[in-house]
Amino acid sequence: MRHFMPQKRRVVITGIGTTSAVGVGMKSLWNALISGQSGAKLCHTFDLSGFSCPFVAQLAADQLDIKQFVPKSYRKATKVMARDIELAVAAAHEAVNDAGLITKSHEAADGKVSMPATQMGCQIGAGSIAAEENELTVAFASSQTADGEIDLGAWGSSGMQNITPLWMLKYLPNMLASHVSIIHDCQGPSNTITCGEASALLSIGESMRVIGRAAADCCLSGGVESKVNLMGVLRQFYSKRLATASLSDDPSSIIRPFNPSATGGMAGEGGAILVLEELESARARGAKIQVELAGFGASQSFCQDTVGIGAEVDGAGIAQAIETALHEAGVKPADVDAIVPFGCGVPGIDASEAAALRKVFGERVSKIPLVTISTVTGNCGAGFGGVAASVAVQCLREQKLPARIQGGKAGESVGGVDGASIGARDAVLNTIVVTTTSLGGQNAAIVLRRIS
């Protein structure tokens, strides 16, 4: 295996912040995972009963007041924040506080920040932000013909005039990193990666490289997306990723990672921002250091249908990403204590992941515990890998594995992996692999290592 970019500086994770269907912050997510709570529920913003799965993994209406997560001087800017941006800003707020970082966002700090703004970067994975339907309906209505059809000529000449002038500023994918960078004064390298569910881990890998080449000492990194909108659910439906369920079903029973009885996944919203720092810089400011980002790998799977709806049967691309991350970390497959996979409950994707894990870890794969989180988060797209990485960090911090629900009976998991239902339990954890694959075939993996 060729290794192209040796990492010259060690990178550690000092803070994590999440937004998920069970609330804002790692505490709410961790409690849900430990107790085996599902994040699935009926959608409170749309009637999705016409879709194959009427349930989503969505924050409750009162769980996110964005004004509580930005400085008072920045509250006017919340008017141009789409849902994805709000989720990212809240996650970044939580991560910065968890890391004990003082940034420009702390207005009482009187300019006394933890590090120079030029040494702080920001790389965030994002999805294709769906425009809010209520902002488009007036424009569409004014572009209708007498028989109710949309006249594209009228749309171009007058319909678009009914869209708010700042409309575009809400829906550009790079606005997540833009707002987070402005709030926390990240003047170092910034980037936005839009590669489906692999986006967050790819962004974390990008931040690792930025710090490794000394272009920054600290980066806010991860990914966030909301698929809980009509366009997001429609895309999940056409990409054959939605489970089959009815309104009478128990929402918590729908997502079944690596369970032979699984029928598909569920649209979700959320993600995570992590604080990545160069080891010595973090030590110098007195940060609490527990986890090292030891390795990163990325790859592209072969997509026979050209768009990645059909997963690669043998999981070769996913395996390559994991092997690259292990190689960089100097970790042997036998040294891995747990794995946090995508595990979305879509049969073909779960089977592809299981094949990849068996390719990398051999027969031992049946003994390496999987940490499955999609029962809480659903498929939050570009945000999934960020949440997965944050959960892995928390597992290493707590020396505990959360519960797995809807995984089925022991010994019956897809591909022979260790994915059966089980309660939370203590564990000796030193090394965890996190991996995601994506619609489109991009794959990413990271290796996290405990620092005692």
Image: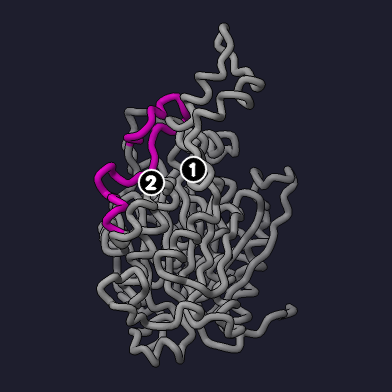
Please provide percent x and percent y for residue 82. 44, 46
Give the camera-side residue of 328 and 23: 23
Please provide percent x and percent y for residue 61. 28, 42
Q: Which residue is mark 2?
A: 79
Which mark is on residue 319?
none
Is mark 1 in CB contact (under 8 Å) with mark 2? Answer: yes
Please provide percent x and percent y for residue 140. 53, 23
Q: Horizontal placement of 391 versus 223: left or right? A: left
Circle 1: element type: loop
- Residue at 26% from the left image edge and 49% from the top image edge: 63
Q: Residues within 10 Å of mark 2 (few under 14, many from 20)?
A: few
Check residue 133 for magenta coloring: no
Q: Is residue 207 above or below residue 6?
A: above
Highlighted range, magenta: 42-69
- Residue at 59% from the left image edge and 55% from the top image edge: 194
Q: Is residue 250 above or below residue 18?
A: above
- Residue at 67% from the left image edge and 52% from the top image edge: 312
Counting residues from the N terminus, which is met first, the one under dot 1 or under dot 2? Answer: 2
- Residue at 64% from the left image edge and 43% from the top image edge: 309
Q: Identify the image quadrant of residue 107.
A: bottom left
Q: Which residue is mark 1?
A: 166
Give the camera-side residue of 45 and 425: 45
Q: Is residue 384 visible?
A: no
Q: Amino acid at mark 2?
A: Lys
Please provide percent x and percent y for residue 323. 63, 73
Circle 2: element type: helix
